[in-house]
Amino acid sequence: MWFVSRTLILAYLMILFKPDVTDGNLILFMGRNYEDSFPDCDVHLFFQEFYVDFHNKPCYDEAEIRFPSELTSASDKRQTEFLAGRSAAKRALEFLGQPPADILISENRSPLWPKNIMVSLSYNNSVAVCAVSQSPACRFLGVDIEETMSDDITSKISSSVVGGREKEILDSLSMSANLALTIAFSAKESLFKALSFKVGRLFGFEDVLISSFSIRDNSITFELLNHIVKKAKLQRKLRCLFRIGKDFVITLVADTQVALNHRWL
């Protein structure tokens, strides 16, 4: 069986992509922040660039963001990523006119967002992104950002992310195997984030299958297995959009799909 636990794959990627830290602590340096949107479905994206260095703890006080007690024993890398994500989310909620408030952590470690708002967070080693929508028509939302995989990573995890017909589709594309797998992996992560709360349980890469991949439209169409369709009360096929940056890809799943602007690429 080609499928390997999604959790194991994520843990493996976290190890491979972690910064080369030998000693000292990490300090977050804020870089450029910018935004984008999906106007037709009222989805807005807020980005926060950051980089890490040694010497001090992440600067929560300077960012005016409460340091959560749940992260007291977390690694400095995790504390830094958390701050970057919360900085992007803070701007997103301000954009929607939400009053300033701490974004607390729930028992299952997910953020506690204001009611009637769809929110999704993601980050890699240098960029955090927050996707938000206040539209009543937006029933689910998922965003993911991934650094482009290396040859070594691609060879190690390919069979755990895609299998059978999916691999044939990726192999037929006029793009590198590394980039194609990165997009496929990220798209499945966006689907997981968008649908997990509707499905009510964890599901894996083998539960959402690539049925088409369009470079021209920057989109992937997925076919959901029956148990996902019934539990989430969704149509069988869902579309995910992707964009390719200099050394990363970003994918997004929402109710209504329109083309991303290109200002952030």
Image: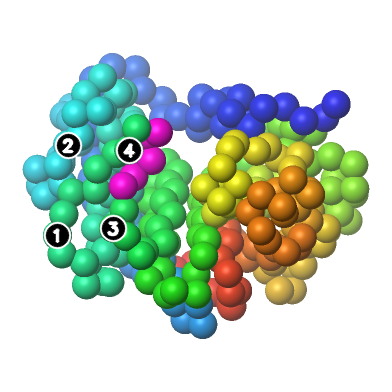
Residue occupying image coordinates x 11% and y 49%: 64
Q: Secondary structure at mark 3?
A: loop
Q: Secondary structure at mark 4?
A: loop
Which numbered disc flags the more N-terminal residue, 1 or 4?
1
Which span of residues is magenta-colored? 108-112
The residue to which callout 3 is attached is 114
The residue to which callout 1 is attached is 100
Query: Rounded to the nearest whole Å, what is the CA distance between mark 1 and mark 4?
Result: 19 Å
Which numbered disc flags the more N-terminal residue, 3 or 4?
4
Residue 130 in picture, x, y percent from top left: 39, 57
Query: Badge 1, how many Cα within 10 Å: few under 14, some, many 20+?
Result: few
Q: Is residue 154 above or below residue 24?
A: below
Query: Badge 4, how many Cα within 10 Å: few under 14, some, many 20+?
Result: few
Which numbered disc flags the more N-terminal residue, 1 or 2?
2
The residue to which callout 2 is attached is 67
Q: Secondary structure at mark 1?
A: loop
Residue type beneath disc 4: Ser
Q: Verify CB contact (< 8 Å) between mark 1 and mark 3.
A: no
Q: Main secondary structure of the magenta part?
A: loop
